[in-house]
């Protein structure tokens, strides 16, 4: 297990980015409330495939905890029951955590797959903390970082439940995203310790300071991006998916800040590229960072001017998460004095 720890860390990183991708697809398709409850979906471990399964019907058996839609409201079975000819409210309790009572097969299964990816990642993190205990005497930071990442994953699961219960409150979604980035940081720190602890990189004070700024800027930009996306989601709910041209009608200050802040991010990261070239520091990750900056900018422009073409939002969010990861990992490399 100890010899395979590097592979486990890499799989954990990949699984976390897959969660980001699944979450981006959920946001892109408006499927966040595809399952109105958590951790089950309409009271099922495997969600229904048609609205008929969650519609109240006479002379039908329902198990305790199953959710139905009746008269545009959600009701939960209080016990195992068999319905009569008329709806008996004594057998059901109103679902009070939110009033979202819509079933859409595509949205339900999109959200369910998102949750399934998270569950599978959870098993990877269990292997991670078990393997990390083998390093306790050798390097306690490996074990502590692994357990920290695992407990933050549990916190993320709780946040996911809170997001659903609150019917996609913007502030909670932002915290959900930022905590995910922190977990990435912990895993990348683990990867660096176990795979590059003997490598020596050139050190430049200005380059290192700019990297710290770039990491902070990326966190701010991603957090603000989740707020902008929530505004778009509200516009879509108001005008419908068929009227995407209204998605950014009368945007708030957050949108203009998010758009204009891109200039600062571009300047800082091109500054890193310039210093790396002029001083011949040899950091190859800088080139990938510039590529991701370009991809972020292009997808952002397309979303604004081309009415959010399909796939651009997922690419935009995933590229932002990759950008943060590369910047953070590069910062670790740049801290080592040669």
Image (cartoon, grey):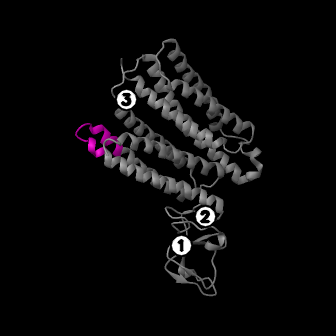
Label whose residue precedes the other's in the sequence (3 or 2): 2
Find residue 243 and report its horizontal and vertical position in percent. Answer: 77, 49
Image height check: is 138 above or below 61?
above
Q: Secondary structure at mark 3?
A: helix
Q: Residue at x 52, y 46 (%)?
A: 18
Q: Image check: 9 left or right of 84?
A: left
Which SS does the magenta portion mostly show?
Answer: helix
Instruction: Specify whether residue 145 is painted magenta.
Output: yes
Magenta segment: 132-147
Number of the front mark, 3 or 2: 3
Q: Is residue 304 visible?
A: yes
Question: Disc 1 and disc 2: Cα gap in Å?
Answer: 16 Å
Residue 186 appears in which quarter of the rendering?
A: top left
| Total count of labels | 3
Label whose residue precedes the other's in the sequence (3 or 1): 1
Instruction: Specify whether residue 313 is painted magenta.
Output: no
Q: Which residue is mark 3?
A: 196
Residue 229 appears in which quarter of the rendering?
A: top right
Question: Disc 3 and disc 1: Cα gap in Å?
Answer: 51 Å
Q: Is residue 33 visible?
A: no
Question: Disc 3 and disc 2: Cα gap in Å?
Answer: 51 Å
Q: Which residue is mark 1?
A: 66
Label whose residue precedes the other's in the sequence (1 or 2): 1
Find residue 242 and report its horizontal and vertical position in percent. Answer: 77, 51
Image height check: is 238 above or below 189?
below
Q: Which residue is mark 2?
A: 99
Residue most extreme to the top? 278
Number of the front mark, 1 or 2: 1
Q: Residue at x 53, y 59 (%)?
A: 165
Q: In front here: 143 or 175? A: 143
Number of the front mark, 3 or 1: 3
């Amino acid at each position: 297990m100890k010899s395979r720890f590097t592979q486990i860390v890499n799989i954990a990183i990949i699984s976390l980015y897959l969660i980001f991708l699944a979450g981006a697809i959920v946001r892109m398709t408006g499927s966040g409330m595809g399952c109105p409850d958590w951790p089950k979906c309409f009271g099922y471990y495997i969600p229904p495939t048609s609205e008929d399964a969650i519609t109240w019907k006479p002379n039908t058996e329902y198990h305790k905890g199953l959710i139905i839609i009746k008269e545009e409201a959600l009701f939960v079975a209080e016990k195992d029951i068999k319905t009569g000819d008329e709806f008996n409210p004594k057998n059901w309790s109103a679902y009070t955590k939110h009033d979202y009572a819509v079933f859409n097969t595509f949205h339900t299964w999109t959200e369910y797959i998102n949750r399934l990816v998270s569950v599978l990642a959870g098993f990877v993190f269990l292997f991670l903390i078990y393997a990390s205990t083998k390093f306790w005497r050798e390097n306690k930071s490996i074990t502590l970082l692994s357990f920290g990442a695992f407990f933050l994953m549990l916190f993320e699961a709780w946040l996911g439940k809170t997001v659903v219960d609150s019917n996609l409150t913007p502030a909670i979604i932002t915290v959900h995203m930022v905590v995910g980035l922190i977990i990435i940081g912990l895993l990348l720190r683990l990867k660096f310790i176990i795979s590059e602890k003997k490598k020596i990189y050139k050190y430049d004070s200005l380059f290192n300071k700019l990297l710290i700024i770039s990491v902070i800027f990326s966190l701010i930009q991603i957090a603000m991006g989740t707020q902008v996306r929530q505004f778009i989601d509200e516009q879509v709910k108001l005008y419908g998916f068929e009227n995407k041209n209204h998605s950014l009608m009368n945007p708030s200050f957050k949108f203009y800040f998010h758009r204009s802040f891109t200039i600062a991010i571009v300047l800082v990261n091109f500054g890193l590229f310039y210093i790396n070239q002029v001083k011949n520091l040899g950091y190859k990750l800088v080139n990938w960072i510039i590529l991701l900056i370009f991809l972020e900018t292009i997808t952002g422009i397309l979303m604004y001017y081309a009415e959010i073409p399909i796939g651009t939002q997922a690419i935009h969010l995933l590229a932002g998460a990759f950008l943060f990861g590369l910047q953070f990992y590069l910062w670790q490399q740049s801290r080592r004095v040669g």
